[in-house]
Image (cartoon, rainbow, N blue to C red):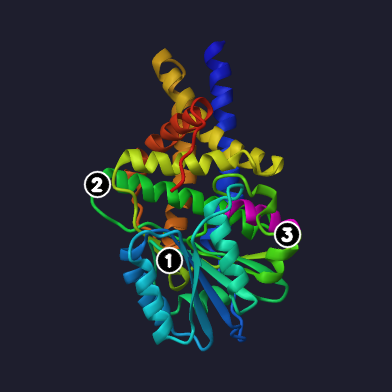
Amino acid sequence: MATIILLVLLGLCVLVQLYFALFYFLPLSKYTDPVTEEKKPISVIVAAHDEQENLYELLPMLLNQDYPEFEVVVVNDRSEDDTEFYLYELERQFSNFKVVTVKKTPDYLNPKKYAVALGIRAAKYEHMLFTDADCRPERTEWINKMQQGYTTGVDVVLGYSPYAHIKGFLNHLIRYETLLTGMQYLSHANKGRAYMGVGRNLSYTKTCFFRNKGFASHIKLLGGDDDLFVRDAANNSKVNIVIDKEGQTSSVPKKTFREWLTQKRRHLSVGRMYKASDKRRIGAFMGANLFFYLLLLIILFMYSKLAILGALVGLRYLTVFPVYVLCARRLNEKLTLPLLLVLDLVYFFNYLFLGVSVLLYKKIRWK
């Protein structure tokens, strides 16, 4: 009897995964980016704290973008390296380059949000495009591709930002986590249910920012300048997505498991501020995957009803994983089925560990 109950629960987990794969992820794998003829002036905004080496690489890429009218606004956020001298030299050379300097953040404000808000106020244009200092545009058409998302009535454009491919299993895990996260927020936005974006590749209008009172609803919270702002903006703004390679930025991944865990704990700590409906959907997806593996291990340990178990496992793998591979190809990520089997198992148990650690140890650091 116990085995039957466990198999029923396992079947429910598989059904939930099939729902997400076929209703959300499969349409994303066939998605076509929007196209507009108008080229709106764009302000590219980067907030940087002691990022001199990264800015040496990033800023020439931004200033060399193939786009008719844009500016680059860099907020030098309390940097103690030689960032200031480099930025002012660029400001002297380029008429479309602007520097905003932050010497001290008010005690009651989050440093990153304060820096971004100052960059927005200094921006010349209505349409703004955001990235981080450790990101790199994949193409010189990045600005052009992202602004294509501004079809009629759109105020927010969500982009995708993968991590660079380096050797090691940790890198595979980081890129798989990034892929799954991207599949979720992009597919939900495609269905009109936007709940987050990533600051590494995100665009919205000044009107949208001030209409939603900036970061006021989460000003004291560490993190959330990207996902929680999108959460608020989605209530009263139309959201588009851009996922072609030309519209992506790549980032340098963490090189140690500890650094990556710290980063992910910070991101997870913000998740409790999502809307209840979004938390239910995300929780259903994550929970169905995690309990699938837990129930699978329990039933295997009991060593009974293996034929039914095999049918459920086969249904899950033969339906869900091919959709994952299709989404990966659409997002220009490399993902093979043999590696996917390992990454999926490790990822969801690691997610359980992260969730427990956030509950037990709530102190989150921010640079």
Which residue, as the protein is rendered here, is positioned at the far left? 167
Q: Of tags 1 and 2, which is closer to the observer?
A: 1
Q: Earlier in the sequence, mark 2 or mark 3?
A: 2
Corner quadrant of residue 306: top left
| Residue matched to label 1 | 249
| Residue matched to label 2 | 168
Where is residue 180 drawn, in percent x and y?
Answer: 47, 48
Element marked by disc 2: loop
Q: Bin the neighbour count of mark 3 within 10 Å (Cα to Cα): few under 14, some 14-19, many 20 and up.
A: some
Q: Is residue 237 left or right of residue 157?
A: right
Q: Is residue 232 magenta?
A: yes
Q: Earlier in the sequence, mark 1 or mark 2?
A: 2
Where is residue 243 drawn, in percent x and y?
Answer: 50, 66
Bounds of the magenta span? Answer: 225-235
Where is residue 184 drawn, in percent x and y?
Answer: 55, 50
Q: Is residue 173 left or right of residue 159?
A: left
State the CA–CA distance, disc 1 to disc 3: 26 Å
Q: Is residue 278 left or right of residue 46?
A: right
Q: Is residue 333 magenta?
A: no
Which residue shows up at 58% across the image and 46% down it?
A: 20
Between residues 345 and 236, which one lies in front from this camera angle?
236
> Disc 3 marks which amino acid?
Asn
